[in-house]
Amino acid sequence: MGSDRLTAPVFSLQHFCLHDGPGIRSLVFFKGCPLRCAWCQNPESWRPAPEIGFREDRCIGCGACIEVCPTGAAAGADGACTRCFACVDRCPTGARVRFGQDREVSSLLADLAPEFPLMADSGGGVTLSGGEPVLHAAFARVLTSALQERGVHVALSTCGFFAETDLGSQHPVAGLLLSVDLILFDLKVWDPDQHVRLCKRENRSIRENFTRLQRAYLDRAAPPVWPRIPLVPGITDTRENLTQWAGFLRDRQCGHVTVVPYHDMGANKRQWLGLDPSPIRGEMGDDGVNRAKSILAQQGIVSFSPGEEAWEIIDPARP
Ligand code: SF4
Ligand code: SF4
């Protein structure tokens, strides 16, 4: 397969990260997500195509964007934007913000390569994140192979929402998930109705996909699956939600989880993208995290904060 012909929309590349897998890592954030979680901190990941945000606080009304726009969209003509990004390039103040760019595997490798020695020294690697990397399975698979050929450990962070048939043996999603070295799997809201209300999708397939991947891991047919629960105040941090997920994990011979505290970092970006404000209020402090960890411990699940995981427990966990 000619890897240079493939592209995928990527909205951010972050280096020297410590919270999304072992060691020091670079994160590749793909655009496009099937969920719309009320607490999402990366709303620029939702739509699959590159897009434009507008920071009203930075606009000085110079009119350069309108002057350069070939379609009238910058002046407010509805639906006329062709995403040529001429206005972003011309805007003198950064009021017009570009989110996402179609990237080729070779250009991502070139950006990631300077960090390869540090990744190797720290036991780190690259984490494919998003958005949902599984939406770009063919591209992500080629990128994964190219990284692994260079000795780089590849983790993949997923929301777990994909068709169960995607885990069939010939499917590109299965090919991707079985080829990475570690799967970070988000478990959010246990209650199905609440999940639909807060994430806009059902969670039956998420539970089923976790179950199938974990079973495959225990059968030595899949990489380790490491669950993560975002701790959102009053929603995912409740005793009931945590107890349900703890039972779910125990039943699947998984005794650990990472709890990721919610911080309100997506509010501005929602505004720039013209999205409704998040209904979530408050942040998750240390007391809330400790309380959640204690509930999980009472249920027999060891929990970790991001960056503090005992990754070495992965293999002994497998019979
Ligand atoms: S991206 Fe291009 S078409 Fe869209 S508003 Fe900017 S200049 Fe106009
Ligand atoms: S070019 Fe930028 S600063 Fe000037 S009017 Fe357009 S958005 Fe505002």
Image (cartoon, rainbow, N blue to C red):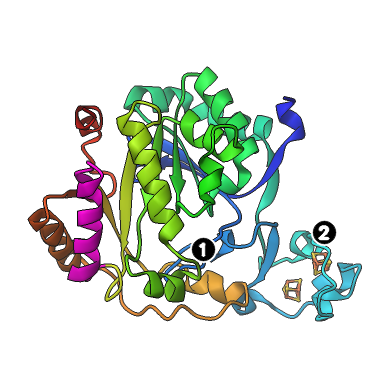
What segment is highlighted magenta in the picture?
237-256
Secondary structure predominantly adopted by residues drawn in magenta: helix
Picture quarter with the C terminus: top left
Picture quarter with the N terminus: top right
Name the residue tied to disc 1.
Answer: 35
Decide if ligand 1 comes within 8 Å of the CB at mark 2.
Answer: yes
Q: Nearer the viewer, residue 175 or 25?
A: 175
Name the residue tied to disc 2.
Answer: 84
Image-quarter location of ligand 2:
bottom right
Residue at position x 25%, y 32% in the image? 314
Measured from the top left, where is residue 297 in percent x and y?
11, 54
Q: How many other residues sit within 10 Å of disc 2, few (<14), some (14-19) or many (≥20)?
A: few
Identify which amino acid the numbered label 1 is placed on.
Leu
Q: Is residue 21 left or right of residue 3?
A: left
The quadrant holding residue 286 is bottom left
Q: CA distance from mark 1 to mark 2?
A: 27 Å
Contact check, label 1 and label 2, Cβ < 8 Å: no
Residue at position x 32%, y 42% in the image? 226
Q: Nearer the viewer, residue 182 or 251?
A: 251
State whether residue 170 is above or below residue 59: above
The quadrant holding residue 232 is bottom left
